[in-house]
Amino acid sequence: MTLADHLTYLCETYQQWEVLVKSKENSFAPTELLSSLRPDERDHRVRVEMGGSGEVIRDAESGDALLEVVWSSARRGWALPESSRAEPHYYVSKENLLVSLCGKVAAPVSSQLSSTPPLGAPVCNACYKRVERGELSIPKSTGAESRIISELLLRGIKFSFSYETSGEETRRGLRVYEREVVGAQLEERNLIVTVNRETKRMAIDVLRLNYHAGKIPAESDVLVTARRGDEEVYCGEGTVGTVVRAWERAPLDSQERQEVKRMIGEFKLPDCQIDSKAQFSDLKRLYDRCSRYYRYASSQIECVKRLTKETTSAFLLHLDEADATWDVTDGEAKFIAELRRQYPELIRTEAGKKERARQSDRQLRQAEERQPIVEARSNLTRFPCKDMLLEVKDVGMLRVGDLKGKMRDGTISPNTLVRYRDSDEWAELGEFLKKWVRSRATREQLNFLTKLQKQRGITDEIPVDMWRSAASARITELLRATAGMR
Ligand SMILES: [Zn+2]
């Protein structure tokens, strides 16, 4: 998602007076800021997070806070609840929350509000009467009905959460979190596949490849689960066929659409229709292969003349056409060999050029060798929890905070294999850190969640490896929670 995308969303969703965007120095209406941005600022990639006091727009890469989104405290109106079973209430602003006039519920400050009650739905009677009488503030009296949510939160009164309101329903011995498979979430879920009474856990992409390659029968059973704290919860089930179809139909979000444009643009890949998460991961795989061969060819400057990204991808697609499995093993060597055979003009011959190239190659390679270490060190600095233990292959358990020292003394390198849970696959430390810092919960989110849970007397352990989106959703959920009072 770009900054322009999110500002456009704010312009389209709210009236101009309802929302301001604040930088360190100034406040703007979203339309005003949108029209004054330079092209590179418009395309700045960002993500939006629920923080302690509201919404923060962050740099997608570094996570630095860029702008704060502030909603007018004059906002009021009817809001549709998330769950269709709950009734709509009338909300007014109170300390970074929207609180219902009846005092029973709160909603995130960013909720959309309407001045008229929703059509055809029974609304909260207490709210309705107060609106009719024109009593549009939350009463000061201390009767149970009139207490506001934030007071209740601080007193640790028990709240019920949307995922718990489905009761204690269990399926296949697991608590139900999602009743049905949600296609768009499959990348973040565990898939347990049963073939010939043997169960295997696999990622959705691996499952899809195996399915299309005919290695797993379509009717094999799949159970979809997720972790919540220490618990494994139920997120739907189906057959390999239905689960793969759900993935192939799951639409892209706006950030992924931008990513599609970027990947296709960078390697001038043939323009193709990318509409689902499954097609997106196909494109991503192609993009990763192009990057890998481009980097390899660039490092072979002694024998290969500089390849452009466009030439690299065109040659790779050409090889794929002849044999889709050509690079299952020894891809790099085959790539160069084929290049030598089919495009000898791209291969260096003159001795003088060779020598020059060798020198510049040496510099390039030295820089490339240093780069992963620099990157790993900076990701270690940004890592949210320094006390977390990682299993380091052939070394044992190490604190994240001790890894820098171990890298300095040469015990480990960015290529060392590590994993967090012993059920995880091994990953190279450099990649592991990069992915973690980009997609797992931030330190601020973990701190804020801990505080929120404490206020509510919830003792569930907060998994440090929760996805950033899941942490954001959990914060929203806790803030939106309904008071179980009276
Ligand atoms: Zn109400």
Image (cartoon, rainbow, N blue to C red):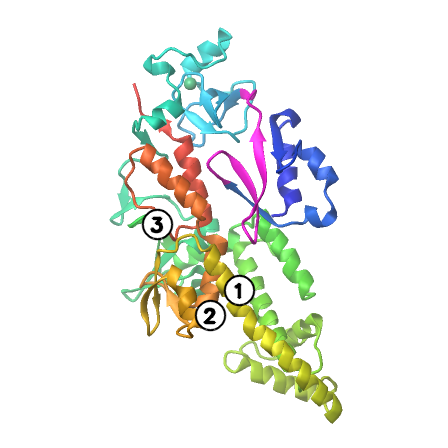
From the viewer's perspective, is residue 103 above or below residue 43? above
Does residue 71 belong to the magenta stretch? yes
Alpha carbon of mark 2 to alpha carbon of mark 3: how far?
Answer: 25 Å
Q: What residue is at 44 percent from the left and 60 percent from the top?
A: 204
* Relative depth, front residue between 5 and 408: 408
Which stretch appears magenta?
50-76
From the viewer's perspective, is residue 311 above or below residue 450? below
Quick check: 189 left or right of 229? right
Does residue 249 belong to the magenta stretch? no
User: Label 1 amino acid?
Assistant: Glu
Quick check: 463 left or right of 13? left
Q: What residue is at 49 percent from the left and 6 percent from the top?
A: 133
* Mark with earlier residue (2, 3): 2
Whether label 2 touches label 1, CB < 8 Å: yes
Alpha carbon of mark 3 to alpha carbon of mark 1: how far?
Answer: 25 Å
* Mark with earlier residue (3, 1): 1
Residue 174: x %, y % from top left: 27, 48
Residue 72: x %, y % from top left: 58, 25
Q: Cβ(mark 2) to ligand 1 < 8 Å?
A: no
Element assignment for label 3 = loop
Report the image quarter containing ligand 1.
Answer: top left
Q: Tell me the quadrant of the picture where the C terminus can be found.
A: top left
Q: What residue is at 56 percent from the left and 69 percent from the top?
A: 371
The single residue placed furthest to the bottom in the displayed view is 351
Q: What residue is at 53 percent from the left and 78 percent from the top?
A: 325
